[in-house]
Image: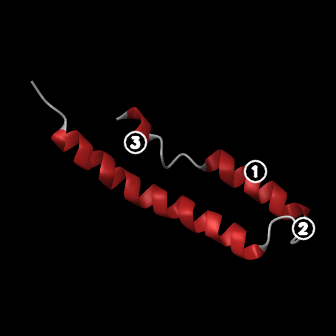
């Protein structure tokens, strides 16, 4: 449950990608940077829904 709730925590990866992207287009091309942004946004949207589904299935006593 904890691992699933940590999936959207991509802030550090985005900071590193931004800093490396600032070094130049030859280090991290625009399409790679855009893909990273897309994946980060997608996991921030989808994983809360998945965690909610996991909590509903969690055994409650």
- If you read the primary sequence from the N terminus, does the residue marked by circle 3 or circle 1 appear first? 3
SS for dot 1 = helix
Q: Position of residue 60 (x, y in %)?
A: 12, 29
Residue 19 lies left or right of residue 61; in this view the side is right
| Residue count near mark 1 (Cα–Cα under 10 Å), binned few <14, some 14–19, many ≥20 | few
SS for dot 3 = helix
Residue 16 lies left or right of residue 54; in this view the side is right
Q: Is mark 2 in CB contact (under 8 Å) with mark 1?
A: no
> Is 36 drawn above or below residue 15 in the view shown?
below
SS for dot 2 = loop
Calculate the distance from the C-alpha at mark 2 to the C-alpha at mark 3: 34 Å
Q: Residue at x 23, y 49 (%)?
A: 53
Q: Residue furthest left?
A: 61
Residue picked out by circle 1? 16
Q: Position of residue 21 (x, y in %)?
A: 81, 63
Q: Position of residue 24 (x, y in %)?
A: 90, 67
Q: Residue at x 62, y 65 (%)?
A: 37
Residue picked out by circle 3? 4
- If you read the primary sequence from the N terminus, does the residue marked by circle 2 or circle 3 appear first? 3
Residue picked out by circle 2? 24
Residue closer to the observer: 35 or 45: 35
């Amino acid at each position: 449950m904890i691992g699933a709730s940590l999936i959207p925590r991509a802030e550090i990866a985005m900071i590193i990608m931004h800093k490396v992207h600032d070094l130049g287009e030859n280090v991290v091309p625009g399409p790679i940077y855009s893909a990273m942004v897309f994946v980060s946004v997608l996991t921030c949207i989808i994983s809360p829904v998945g965690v909610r589904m996991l909590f509903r299935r969690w055994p409650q006593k």
